[in-house]
Image: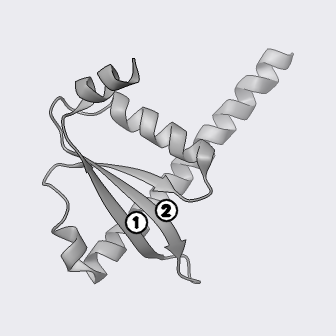
């Protein structure tokens, strides 16, 4: 019975992460449209990995999932969301560009 409850809890957490990621992606797109100078900082075809202040579980899930599904040699941009506007839009972020791709990231974890 405990296994079933744990599995249901994990599935619910993942659904919440996916919903949060959907909202975050939409808000980030809006942020880039309003701040075109930041859009130029992203490589074409970059894998965007969100890291949201105060959201440790989501950050771990999103990073692991994203890196696992990245293309070989795909540029990676970590977007640290530090502050939200009162109407739930992103107000301030920073970009950290990573070199290499999935294999390099995986070899560093070992």
Confirm or deny contact between disc 1 and disc 2 (CB under 8 A).
Answer: yes
Seen in the image, is 105 located left or right of residue 5? left
Measuring from the top left, give residue 13's x and y in whole percent: 66, 40
Q: Residue at left 60%, top 47%? A: 56
Q: Residue at left 52%, top 38%? A: 61
Measuring from the top left, give residue 64's x and y in whole percent: 44, 33
Q: Residue at left 22%, top 33%? A: 101
Against 21, is 83 above or below? below
Measuring from the top left, give residue 35's x and y in whole percent: 27, 80
Packing grade of label 1 (10 A; few <14, some 14-19, many >=20) is: few
Against 22, is 100 above or below? above
- Asked whether 5 or 41 is in front, the reply is 41
Q: Secondary structure at mark 1?
A: helix
Location of mark 2 (residue): 23
Against 102, is 91 above or below? below
Residue 26 is marked as: 1
**On the image, which quarter does residue 73 sit in?**
top left
Seen in the image, is 71 located left or right of residue 12? left
Q: Secondary structure at mark 2?
A: helix
- Asked whether 78 or 85 is in front, the reply is 78
- Asked whether 62 or 9 is in front, the reply is 62
Q: Which image quarter holds the C terminus?
A: top left
**On the image, which quarter does residue 3 sit in?**
top right
């Amino acid at each position: 019975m405990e296994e079933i409850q744990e599995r249901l809890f994990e599935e619910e957490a993942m659904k919440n992460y996916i919903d949060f990621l959907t909202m975050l992606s939409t808000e980030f797109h809006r942020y880039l449209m309003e701040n075109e100078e930041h859009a130029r900082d992203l490589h074409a075809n970059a894998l965007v990995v969100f890291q949201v202040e105060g959201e440790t579980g989501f950050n771990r899930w999103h990073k692991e999932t994203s890196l696992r599904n990245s293309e070989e040699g795909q540029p990676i941009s970590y977007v640290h969301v530090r502050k939200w506007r009162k109407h739930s839009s992103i107000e301030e972020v920073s970009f950290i560009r990573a070199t290499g791709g999935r294999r390099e990231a995986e070899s560093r974890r070992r």
